[in-house]
Amino acid sequence: MLEEQRHYRHPQSSPEQIDRDVARPPAPTFTGENVILAARGGDGRLVGMCWCVFFNPGTGLEAEVAEVYVEPGFRSQGLGRELLKRAIDLFRERGVTFASVWTRESNPQAVRLYEQAGFQRTEQLVLTWLPLPGR
């Protein structure tokens, strides 16, 4: 773990922190929490949301922005940016050690939104397995 973390730009754990973390066996299960940040229009109608998921797999509190959605008529007004700012504030308040968001390269508006909020592309290669027929 000590050698591997040097390949990434994130806060580095000391050898002592790593020793402490691996001395405890991982729990057989863990739970998470869903937090949905909502934005409402002047009439009280929901016009935007940011769904955040919090969980601790045994290595510190992690978070994911699972979804950001803004109604088409309310886009390009900074609502998505404000929702993500509040999500990141919440990550900081809760002491999140790692947060991620997933999107597609073919969605440049989302990529730009997430990068402007402080999310960065990483050197990590993410491979996925999906339960497709024949697999």
Image (cartoon, grey):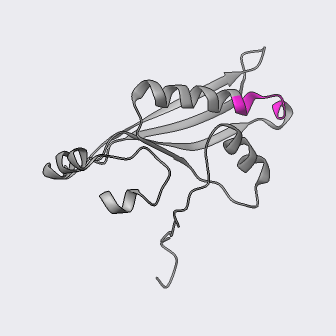
The residue range painted magenta reads 74-81
Residue name at image x 71 percent, y 39 percent:
116
Return the residue found at the far bottom.
134
Looking at the image, residue 41 sits to the left or right of residue 58; the answer is right
Residue name at image x 17 percent, y 45 percent:
20
**Number of callouts in the render?**
0
| Residue 72 drawn above or below residue 112 | above
**In the image, residue 125 lies in the stretch drawn in magenta:** no
Looking at the image, residue 110 sits to the left or right of residue 3; the answer is right
Q: Nearer the viewer, residue 34 or 93?
A: 93
| Residue 54 drawn above or below residue 79 | below
| Residue 122 drawn above or below residue 90 | below
Quadrant where the N terminus lies? Answer: bottom left
Residue 113 location in percent, x, y? 72, 41
Residue name at image x 59 percent, y 25 percent:
86
Q: Nearer the viewer, residue 84 or 73?
A: 84
Residue 64 location in percent, x, y? 50, 44
| Residue 39 drawn above or below residue 6 | above
